[in-house]
Amino acid sequence: MGIYVDALREGWELLSSGTFDIWAIILTSLRVSGAATMIALLIGIPIGLVVGLKRFVGRGVALLVFNSGMGMPPVFVGLIVAMALSRRGPFGDLSLLYSQTAMVIAQVIIASPIVMAITAASVSAVPRALRLQAKSLGAQSWRVALLTLREARMGLIAAVAAGFGSVISEVGAVQMVGGNLEGETRVMTTAIVQYTRMGRYGYALSLALVLMAIVIMVNIVLTTMQTSAQRWEKQ
Amino acid sequence: MHHFAYAPRAWCLVSLGLAAVLALSLAGCAKPADTSTEPVAQQPAEVILASTTSTQDSGLFDVLIPAFEAANSPYRVKVIAVGTGEALKLGETKDADVLLVHAKADEEKLVAAGYGVDRKDVMYNDFIIVGPENDPAGIKGSADTTAAMLAIARAGEAGKATFVSRGDDSGTHKKEIKLWTGSGIETPTPETDDWYESTGQGMGESLKIASEKGAYTLADRATYLSMADTISSAILYEKDKALLNQYGVIVVTDAKNQVGGQALYDWILSPEGQKVIGEFGVEKYGQQLFIPNAQ
């Protein structure tokens, strides 16, 4: 156990002395993954809504694609995006490889299917009778959609948590398209890999603990929102 | 919340599935890997060699390790390719049996501290400065390495060039710092110098990043040659004494398989092992990638 104790002590000293600029890395992580989650929600919720509610040809296929997308290996996404953005790739002229934009693109691709699949599942669980009733009372279709989303908000909260949780703790794709450049594209996960490889367990462990704390905090907030919504509904 | 009523059952199924996967993978792990150890050899057959990513990326081990294993049954070598920093740490923590790295000063420190039995020169290759074909800093034909480094720094400050650093405490990174200091300038940092990037990654990845960004970087010749046809960087400065890259081998004191580590150490330093090193790459690249120089 000595190895953990030593690393923890070193990590604590680094954090408290302020010699290790951990905040720049944490902020980059939050900025990139936050932006990616927001975009994934903008893309995923409308599509998930349509696929969850409408009956159309190929709906089964769409659901299958989203559900498989949830298990899509991030390294695969990283490889495809890296190839697309590299100088010899189709979008090479944009010189986006090894930038935060490239990382956001990869993370949007990772998070969107998750948001779509969870949205589709939760809106299709909203009782059909509710929508029919709203329609019969003369509600316009966008109002019906909003009502359905409101009813399915627990699922949407889960979608936010799952999307953000998956991208902020992902390492393969951001390493490939971000390049772990100090002060630019270095995020918590890639920094943890780097410090471990350099044998600096204290740096790695302190970052890993912060990452854990962030993921737990996000889930606490979301769980609180869920339970308070539930309580409100029971009244 | 009737529409979530299915959840408990679904979770049961999911956790059952997970449990099954876990059980299977554990069963796979439980099978001991070295049942092949014959009663002849009481020593464990597995030798752990910690080395650097640049050596691994060059492809040397793909030739060297099979040759060693063929000559030294039943040993089997597991190569852990990390930065020199971690490779040395793996020696300190005795997680490796033998080290093959290139940071002579640190290697000697490790041995002096009692973590290594002995350190010997094995081979050397050289570093090269690569960069964009049009050479915006004009380092081609510099009088010496110092002049080349200064030219890059000056062009960088003028916004005409970028330099990509490994920034990972590797042997190559240590060499780069030595070259900056040797040129009489303070080692640049990404915070203070816009033209200086630090990847914190291996040689192959850093070369790719430098190529994509049209930046200069310090690379070992072997890794560069193995990647030359996939990147657009060119060799712009080379063949200076300051750019030599000496590799050393160290047996870890009281390692789990110190005898096996010693066997690999002895073989690499033997005429047989030295010959394999000297011939590596000649066929593929038309030149030696490493020059054996064990005494």
Image: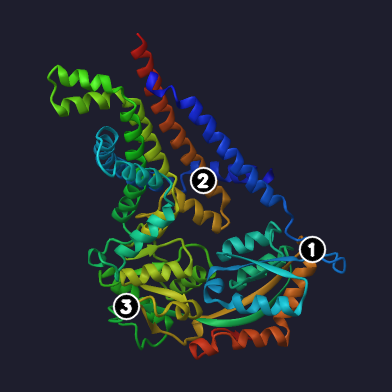
Q: Nearer the viewer, mark 2 or mark 3?
A: 3
User: Circle 3 sits on which residue?
Assistant: B132
B228 above or below B117?
A: below
* Residue beneath the point at 68% across and 80% down: B67
At which x and y percent is residue B100?
64, 72
Chain letter of the residue carrying label 3 = B
Please state, as top left, top right, bottom left or bottom right, where the C terminus of chain B lies in the image.
bottom right
- Do the residues at discs 2 and 3 belong to one chain? no
At which x and y percent is residue A198?
55, 59
Q: Which mark is residue A14?
A: 2
Q: Which mark is residue A85?
A: none
Q: Does the rendering let one see residue A2?
A: yes
Q: Quadrant of residue A137?
A: top left
SS label for mark 3: loop
Chain letter of the residue carrying label 1 = B
Q: Amino acid at mark 1?
A: Pro
Question: Left or right: where does residue B246 sit relative to residue A27?
Answer: right
* Residue beneath the point at 33% across and 49% down: A109
At which x and y percent is residue B60?
58, 78
* Residue beneath the point at 23% across and 23% down: A147
Q: Amino acid at mark 2?
A: Leu
Q: Quadrant of residue B50?
A: bottom right
Chain letter of the residue carrying label 2 = A
Please state, as top left, top right, bottom left or bottom right, where the N terminus of chain B lies in the image.
top left
At which x and y percent is residue A103?
34, 53
B179 above or below B202?
A: below
Q: Which mark is residue B44?
A: 1
